[in-house]
Amino acid sequence: MEGKVLVGTYARNPVVISSGKGCKLYDPEGREYLDCTSGIAVNALGHGDPDWVKAVVEQANLLTHVSNVFYSVPQVTGFFTVYFFYIMRVYLHITLILIVLERFFFLFNAYIFLLSSFVYKLKREFLDFSI
């Protein structure tokens, strides 16, 4: 039966989970398991967190789904938050690039200094014909 409804892309554990609280899972017989997985394509938020449940209930009382044909308040207000974090991420990347470039040029200048010192020594030793 399972092969008819699921694509076998991963192995399944032979455990039936009936409930969870925080990072603990329970089977129908009451055995406790530590949930060390984050799921597949989901967040690892734990199970039955009161704040999360409250937020879901509040949102479900307002709006559960809106087609992308329309805008919703979280989309409109969230745009500015997402845009702000995008700008901060770009700023961070530019800062990291500048740090890398600064270190590169520091090492490059040190290399040039050592090379010029070496050339100067060679010049003094081999080209100094003063008697």
Image (cartoon, rainbow, N blue to C red):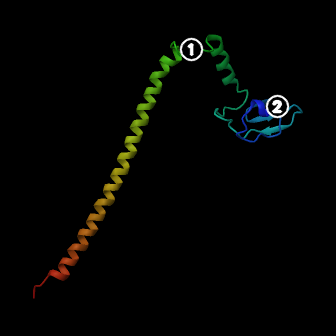
The image position of residue 40, as x and y in percent, is: 67, 35
Residue at x-position 69% and y-position 22%: 53
- Of residues 4 and 53, the one nearer the viewer is 4
Residue sitting at the far front: 4
Residue sitting at the far right: 29
Which one is closest to the eye, mark 2 or mark 1?
2
Residue at x-position 65% and y-position 14%: 60
Question: Would you place residue 82 above or below residue 123 in this image?
Answer: above
* Residue matched to label 1: 67
Name the residue type under label 1.
Ser
Question: Would you place residue 66 above or below residue 107 in this image?
Answer: above
Instruction: Answer left or right for 104 relative to 61.
Output: left
- Please tell me how crowded label 1 is: few (under 14), some (14-19), or many (20+) other residues with Cα within 10 Å: few
Question: Would you place residue 9 above or below residue 117 in this image?
Answer: above
Name the residue type under label 2.
Met
Q: Secondary structure at mark 1?
A: loop
- Please tell me how crowded label 2 is: few (under 14), some (14-19), or many (20+) other residues with Cα within 10 Å: few
Residue sitting at the far left: 131
Instruction: Answer left or right for 84 relative to 102.
Output: right
Residue at x-position 68% and y-position 37%: 38
- N-terminal label among 2 and 1: 2
Instruction: Answer left or right for 16 relative to 42.
Output: right
Q: Are marks 2 and 1 in contact (CB under 8 Å)?
A: no
Residue at x-position 37% and y-position 41%: 94
Q: Secondary structure at mark 2?
A: loop
Residue 96, located in which quarter of the rendered image?
Answer: top left
In the rendered image, the quadrant that contains the C terminus is: bottom left
The image position of residue 72, as x and y in percent, is: 53, 14
Numbered circle sitting on residue 1 = 2
Residue 57, located in which quarter of the rendered image?
Answer: top right
Residue 83, located in which quarter of the rendered image?
Answer: top left
**Gap in angstroms between the C-alphas marked 2 and 1:** 34 Å
